[in-house]
Amino acid sequence: MLAEKLRIPVVASGDLFRQALEKQTELGKKAKLYMEKGQLVPDEITIQMVLERLKAPDTANGAILDGFPRNTNQAKALDEALKKQNKGIDRVIYIKVAEEEIIRRLGGRWICRNCQTPYHEVDNPPRVKGKCDRCGGELYQRADDKPETIRKRLEVFLAETAPLIDYYRRAGKLVEVEGGRGSASEVTRKILQALDR
């Protein structure tokens, strides 16, 4: 929703990894070993994939990065790479959500194999269980959306990703938004309001 409002693409590292897996690229095969265990993919693999994607023409007016950077090493490498292109990060949005709510949300997430439309078994179920409303494709739950993997991902977040909050706060780029309550539309509205400030 935010991408539609701002008219810029979303560059999601997880999507880049999944595309690399589907195409059986060398980077995709390496990333798979980490993703299946709920671990972060090593920096050099992630950075290479994201920077390659940011060279695409549709990112000329900017992009929303999702899932990247995940640690300060990635953030610094991204800053350096973008600086060489006379670009930079404008804002970093930190959507604050309680741990149990994160587990509930991700644990109920299902995605269409064909068109990647997301669903949630409670908050946004498909009209027909297991089938995409848009294209009729099969819905599946990603391995990293299982509760045990989500808990592992949260542990990794606290250890490796949380320092990014301070990194971007010190840089004056952090925008904090409460995301634990309200619909996706309401959270999007809060984000847009925070960006306007």
Image: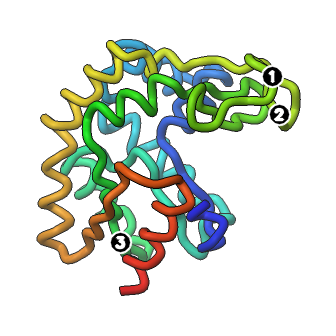
* Residue 10 location (% of width, % of height): 57, 55
Kind of residue at disc 2: Asp
Which residue shows up at 45% across the image and 50% down it?
66
- Residue matched to label 2: 133
Which residue shows up at 37% across the image and 54% down it?
179
Question: Which callout, 1 or 3, points at the residue further toward the start of the chain?
Answer: 3
Residue nearest the observer in this picture, 80 or 140: 140
Callout 1: helix, strand or loop?
Answer: loop
- Residue matched to label 3: 91
* Residue 19 location (% of width, % of height): 63, 31
Which residue shows up at 39% across the image and 34% down it?
45
Callout 2: helix, strand or loop?
Answer: loop
Residue nearest the observer in this picture, 160 or 32: 160
Q: Is residue 61 visible?
A: yes
* Residue 123 location (% of width, % of height): 57, 37
Callout 3: helix, strand or loop?
Answer: loop
Vertical placement of 42 versus 130: above or below? Answer: below
Residue found farthest to the bottom? 197
Q: Is residue 30 visible?
A: no
* Eye-nearest disc, 2 or 1: 1
Question: Which callout, 2 or 3, points at the residue further toward the start of the chain?
Answer: 3
Vertical placement of 136 versus 157: above or below? Answer: above
| Residue 157 - label | none
Question: Which callout, 2 or 1, points at the residue further toward the start of the chain?
Answer: 1
Which residue shows up at 57% across the image and 29% down it?
122
Q: In which quarter of the image is the N terminus?
A: bottom right
Q: What separation in Å lies between label 2 and label 3 (alpha carbons)? A: 34 Å
Left or right: residue 121 compared with residue 180: right
Left or right: residue 139 compared with residue 192: right
- Residue matched to label 1: 128
| Crowd tier of the residue under label 3, counting other residues whose Cα lies within 10 Å: few below 14, some 14–19, many 20 or above | some
